Amino acid sequence: MLMATMTFSPDEGDHELLPPMNLSVTSYNFKTILTWSYVDKTTDTTFFTVETRNYQSAQWQLFSPCSNISSHSCDVTKAFSVNLSPLSSYYAKVKATTYFQESLYAITDRFSFKENATLGPPTVDVMVHGQQVTLKCIFPRVEKLNTETGLNVNNDFKCKICVGQKGHNKLANCSIKRSRWKFNVTRSNVTLCVSAQVNSEQWKMKAEWSKQKCFKIHFLNLQDILIILFAVITIILGFSTINLLWKLFQKELVLPKSLIFIVKAINPHVEKIEEDAVSVVIKYEKMISSDHDLTFEEVAKPSTCPENTESHTSDLKYAGKAHEYDRPQNLENLH
């Protein structure tokens, strides 16, 4: 990003070698870069040399990292951090050289961080816990430079955090001079957007806003909890009722012991009695053989009286009765 543009069109005079042109100094997060352009009209290889000067000093200093270089840029961060303070100003100049000649110097305009530098946007970390939102501002990485007082350049950095509802053109509720911000949201199912900017009271530099970061707030209020609870209870009761009805239709009806006498009065055909319950025959059907044959059974009873010489008569089983409770009976002679 171009923060300051300095141009210089020197008088060539007797110098055949043209000086560099369109000098520019940009500083982003305290990283300062000097650039220039050059129109080479010679066949020889051209090199460039950079010198810097603090505004408070009248003497130029050769910047050795950028002496006799072939590129058209130079990182002058270290040169522009000597006696660093918000009031510091700096200059830089560049000349072109070949093996046989050199050009005049092209000089930049006065540079200061307050007037020409830019701070990049911070990163906003969003943490949502129910209704509570926590916003944490993470500052951009800057060069590890100390001021003339020994403090780091980002010592007084703060964040300006703005929050607004998604869809609104302008963010409101701006928190100034905070690096961390906590607040509660009263409405559920709302989407908020946040953007932040680094704020420095000491440097007062131009600062960029971070890109809007949107997040949704959703939490359960009392009405939602009651609705969910009612739905869960309804489902549980429904399944329990279905399960109970299924068991009653699948199993034999079992009555409590206290109802035995009532059941006997209604239907005396009790099939099985247990300790705690009685099983009752609900339906009784008459069983008849398919061919309706009558079966006769002859039963002979040995004589129990030695003096009785009469022959025993044979009894016939009751015929025509097919009830399950009928049993074959032997009729003894009466004396």
Image (spheres, rainbow, N blue to C red):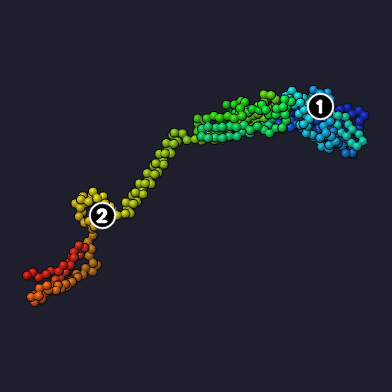
Query: Which residue matches tag 1?
Result: 53
Q: Residues within 10 Å of mark 1 (few under 14, many from 20)?
A: many
Provide the secondary structure element on which disc 2 rests.
loop
Task: Tell me the amino acid under the disc marked 1.
Answer: Arg
Q: Residue at 32% x, 51% y: name it.
A: 248
In this view, 282 is above or below 289: above
Q: Viewed as shown, does residue 92 lie left or right of 179?
A: right
Q: Residue at 22% x, 51% y: name it.
A: 260
* Badge nearest the viewer, 2 or 1: 2
Task: Tell me the amino acid under the disc marked 2.
Answer: Glu
Q: Position of residue 180 (x, y in %)?
A: 59, 30
Q: Residue at 21% x, 56% y: name it.
A: 269
Provide the secondary structure element on which disc 1 rests.
strand
Closest to the observer, 254 or 207: 254
Q: Residues within 10 Å of mark 2 (few under 14, many from 20)?
A: few
Any mark on residue 274, and which?
2
